[in-house]
Image (tube, helix red, strand yellow):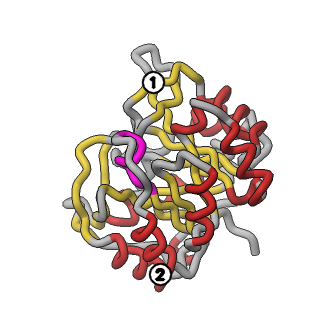
Amino acid sequence: MYRPRVIPCLLLRGQGLVKTRKFKDPVYLGDPINAVRIFSEKEVDELVVLDIQASRENRPIDFELIAELAGECFMPVCYGGGVRSADDIRRLIRSGIEKVAINTASFQSFDLIQEAAASYGSQALVGAIDVKRNLMGRPKAMAAGGTKDTGVGPVEQARALVHAGVGEIFLNSIDRDGTYGGYDIDLIRTVSGAVSVPVVACGGAGSHADFGRAIREGGASAVAAGSLFVYYGKHRAVLINYPAPHELPDLD
């Protein structure tokens, strides 16, 4: 029976696995290869891997590391971070990546998405939107790893990404990242109601119950989380974990 996807989201900083809080203060967790191996053993639905520095520092993708990560995966993998060209997308897909997430480059031009969609299909492209609320509470789409305010609203950006050819939206709340405070349901509801493609909600999951809220109340098609799958207990001991099917609430 169909169940909405529950997706671990791993953050890379250099060649290390890290976790952030509100996109700041990355804490080193260990070797990402080891984490991917454990998630493969646990048969997770899918995996999202994001390089949090590539766009900020305008540096190239570490294709060797990504190929090594993809080689350890027995589940679909989405990669994002520093994707700037059609050649980047081609090399990522050839290395074993099923989906490529594009964020910063889309604010310069949608040509890259249109070209890649024509070559690989919309299912291979994910429009990543990092959202931060301003002092008035209005959500804005951010670029360059959450450091640049684009002035564009998330709904406007989501619609433009879908029009350009992405097959999925990865919607990440900067304000909720690493807080365990629950997903931004209003944000998820607004974006998912504005587009026809699946929306993956990320940022703020504090318990398995939050997954169901994002899907039932927000309209998300899938949920992603970071802290919940790399930490354990109130003291945040580093432990790669993933719920067994019977540990998940009813997500429909």
The image quadrant where one finds the C terminus is: bottom right
Q: Residue at x 40, y 54 (%)?
A: 51
Q: Which residue is mark 1?
A: 149
How far across and how far down the image is residue 4, in percent? 66, 63
Marking on residue 72: 2
Q: Residue at x 46, y 61 (%)?
A: 49
Q: Residue at x 73, y 36 (%)?
A: 193
**Closer to the N terminus: mark 1 or mark 2?**
2
Q: Residue at x 44, y 56 (%)?
A: 61
Q: Please check the rendered image and state whether residue 51 is part of the magenta-colored stretch, yes or no.
A: yes
Mark 1–mark 2 distance (CA, rounded to whole Å): 36 Å
Residue nearest the observer in this picture, 187 or 9: 9
The span picked out in magenta is 50-56
How far across and how far down the image is residue 122, in percent? 76, 53
Circle 1 packing at 10 Å, graded few (<14), some (14-19), many (20+), is some
Up the image or down, 4 lies above or below 206; here it is: below
